Amino acid sequence: MSNSGEFDLAKDLALRAQKAGFFVSTDQIARWSRDGLLPKPHQHGFGPVIGGSETRYPLETGKQLLALCYFHITERYRTLEVVGWYLWLNGFAVSDKYWRRPLETAARTFADGRQLIKRRLLDTAMGIVSDRAAGSQLFSALAIAPSENRQFRRARRRVGAAQIGDFCRLMTTIAVGAYRADNQHHEADREEDRSILTRGFGLRRAYTDRLDNGVTLLSKPFESDLERFSAQLRTLSGPSLLRSVTTERMKHARDDLRLLFSGLMGTYRNLEKEHGKNAFGLGVIADFGTITDIKLQALIILLFDATIRSDPDNQLRKILAEIEAKRVSNGRKPVDTEPAR
């Protein structure tokens, strides 16, 4: 290894990868660096007396190389675009193209899809999505439709095939910014919608499980929060989302979201040991931290930044500070060191 403690040579990096079970050449390391997946090296000359030069990589390159090998070789993500996205998602510095393109694609897809839904289902069909009977018929095919999305399949099991159409109707209404807590005229229908959302989000036990002080995580209906979130989504547009795709802003949104999910998953694992699976309704929320679909990951980061992080009345900073303090007090580093998929 290099003696300076300030850099690594390509042969040092190759040896480190080999010790971890990955066999890569110095030429391959150089190619990945040129592709923007690893930090750029510095060509260091020895002066006229000694002559010659050597290629020096920043010290952080070793850790990033191991993460790259993990995604490219262990997880078998063959395309560099996917590997680059996951490196960025885990906090590593990569070429902008690897994170900017998925986020910009997610912004356009969300804006275009929402406009299509509003034009074909809301504006021209007189609020059909908000109407329980019509909306349920519209989405009824989802009861038996195959899906590769694990989160959707689990939601369908929680809600039941007979009412998955209602759940999708409600989620669509929220997404297009048309959700209202009083959309339904009859109290019985409002109660039914509340029950569907509670089961769909896996929050039943959030109202029944009690902490050591006897308090439940939720004690009142959450429709007003969904209405506020839907109103925030209504103000978003394709251009505004695209403008938010900047280096520092997306980096902060990514890091805050990673910390939030890691805190939720850590809390859930501890509660699960004592109270069983899906304790306090946190199982579904923690499950969202394991989403592997890049389009969904990018969209979640965008919407998280545009709504929760941008809401002046949110408690996010306080929550993240508490999570960080707990992690440090438990002797863990402020940021996760294991790659997350």
Image: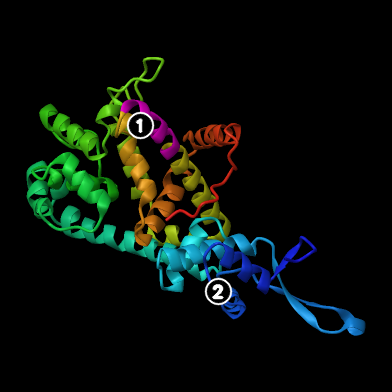
Residue 35 to residue 303: above or below:
below
The residue pinned by badge 2 equals 24
Secondary structure category for the residue under label 1: helix
Quarter-of-image position of residue 194: top left
Nearer-N-terminus badge (1/2): 2
Residue visible at 27% across and 61% down in the picture: 113
Magenta span main SS: helix
- Is residue 203 a member of the stretch shown in magenta? no
The residue pinned by badge 1 equals 272
Residue 2 to residue 29: above or below:
above
Frontmost residue, 172 versus 265:
265
Number of dots carrying numbers: 2
Q: Are marks 1 and 2 in contact (CB under 8 Å)?
A: no
Figure colour scheme:
rainbow
Span of residues in magenta: 265-275
Amino acid type assigned to the residue bearing label 1 in the image: Glu
